[in-house]
Image (tube, rainbow, N blue to C red):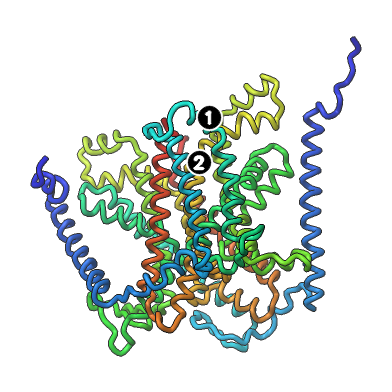
Amino acid sequence: MNKVTWLRKNLFSTWYNTLLTIICLYFLFWIVKGCLFWAFHQAQWQVIPVNLHLFLVGRFLQSLYWRIWIVLGIITILSLITLSLFTKKSNIIKGRFSQSITPWIAPIWLLSFPINIWLIGGGFGLQSVSTNLWNGLLLTLLMAIVSIVLSFPIGVILALGRTSNLFLTRWFSILYIEIVRGLPMIGILFIAQVMLPLFLPTELRLDPLIRGIAGLVLFSAAYMAENVRGGLQSIPRGQTEASKALGFNTPLVVILIILPQALRAVIPAIVGQFISLFKDTSLLSLVGLVELTGIARSILAQPQFLGRYAEVYIFIGLIYWLFCYSMSLASRKLEKQLGN
Amino acid sequence: MTNTKPPIWRDYRFWQIAVQCIAVILVIAIVATLWMNLNRNLQQLGMKFGFDFLQQEASFDIGETLVNYKPTDTYILALLVGLINSLRVAIAGILLTTIVGTTAGIASLFDNWLVRNISLVYVEVFRNTPLLLQLLFWYFGVFLVFPKVENKFYVWGLIHLSQNGIELPGFTFSPEFSTLLLGLTFYTGAFIAEIVRGGIKSLPKGQWEAGLSLGLKPTLLMRLVIFPQALRVIIPPLTSQYLNLTKNSSLAIAIGYPDIYFVASTTFNQTGKAVEVMILIMLTYLTLSLIISLMMNLLNRSVQIKER
């Protein structure tokens, strides 16, 4: 199909299509012209390169950046190994080695987690870095990942509680899930930041970071529960009945038969939830944590960058977008693979 | 062989009761500990739990009100003003976002390449960036750099844009209200577009073919055959988007629009009554969510297939 037929088929097939095309072209021309004019003549982009390190890691000590690089290295290597294990085409790791390493990949990820935290935060022989210096994209990623990991087991328990036939556990789960889902996230974060200290013993002083994570986990667990419940309900009753007939007791049926199948079915939904949690971490800037949005606001408060709102917000918007969009592409791919 | 009774831990009824008892004890223990801590902490701070403060003078001003309100009025009235502001933005947002989302959703199914891709780009851009960031961008990056009122500019001769917000013939919207409304509309609209697209695509191809072979024109086919059926798939997820929009309207606090959350937050800052204020916020949002769910369920019932 050459270009002319393509144009005729896709843009000018009927009179109203032609009209639509012309309106859209005019509209696009108008917008693109305005944006380009602004970007090249009015915007002052120096605010981005000057503060790039602030956007990425915030006020983290510059002399300790090597630790962040190591963390990045560990995560990259682990991701590459995981990817090459789960995509058939790649031939970086082959055959026996791949088979012997597969069962270890989850424990290695779990183990890498405290090591990464140690590298970022220090202590135990490394110079310690106070948590209020963990800012920017670093904090955004950390909060999102920690919260989704922690909310997973709570979500599974709540989902099991909600689908169980035990009257009281079911109602407790429903109560929790529905109250949390009925509240705006900023309210939950407010509860975690302001009210949690009131509900805890006075001796227990929680770090604002921990309180932020607590808020995200409280919030995320309710949504996770609903996702997992979807998976649980997609498992046919026959599975339970068959395993009961084989003599499994209820906990074993749930752990060995139902959950593995249900969780496999909800992986795409969990990725989707991670994307929205990643976006929602921006709300932490409203309760005083300096993650990506928070650092943008504090940069904009500096007198020499006053009024550079559009440039800064477009830049960090691009960062959020890159992460979310690539994750949603990955989730679509995953969904296709799981479907086969 | 004697017929002995099996031990009690072999009985599933025992476990059912035991597990529930453990759950109840656990929940009661947690709640009691938290409550005791709360009482002790409040005592140390010299405060008492109670809603009496609502009758006191609020003594802060609210920028935008639909009812008469002055700083000498009570906290109750201030919160009511906030609630009305929330409802105003939520209702307008739900109406607008439905229009934007449905338009974008249908546009993404057009056979015109350009229209389809504009809709696609819109959805991917707005869905994949945080709403808070979009609001900050619209407010600080766009509305506050508009010209002053004296040299406001016109779009199509009808809409006036300036730092004072949007002026339509007969109405004026403050920049805060306009930002929140537009931000919520376009953010939620991107999700609704996907829902509408999915709903329409879920119909079997035979529906289109049958309609076309009956001689229906595409627009009529859409209105009479496709859309009513797609609505059955669309309405349940649409409900949750409406709920999200209502809850997300609480982000008004970031740009200073006095909605219920903003007023409640100011109330907390002045009185220090964290628990009471939070209970009020909870009740408000749960009630709003319940009302929206009920209304959408009624709507849902009316579009479901009626079988005898």
- Residue found 59% across the figure and 87% down from its top: B71
Give the image location of residue A269, x and y in percent: 49, 44
- Residue beneath label 1, please? A100
Q: Is residue B143 left or right of residue A283?
A: left
- Chain designation of label 2: A
Labels 1, 2: front one? 1
Q: Residue at x 41, y 30 (%)?
A: A340
Residue B21 image position (x, y, % from top left)? 81, 43
Seen at 56% across and 62% down, the residue is: A184
Which quadrant would residue B59 be assigned to in this image?
bottom right
Q: Earlier in the sequence, mark 1 or mark 2?
A: 1
Query: Is residue B97 visible from the viewing direction of this image?
Result: yes
Q: Are marks 1 and 2 in contact (CB under 8 Å)?
A: no
Chain ID, mark 1: A
Q: Amino acid at mark 2?
A: Ile
Q: Image check: A90 left or right of B8?
A: left
Checking the image for residue B215, the label placed there is none
Observer-nearest of B272 and A83: A83
Residue beneath the point at 68% across and 80% down: B271
B70 horizontally vs B190: left or right: right
Q: Residues within 10 Å of mark 2 (few under 14, many from 20)?
A: some
Q: What's under tag 1, amino acid-wise?
A: Ser
Q: Which mark is residue A267?
A: 2
Label 2 element class = helix
Percent coordinates x, y for residue B127 in the rendering: 40, 56
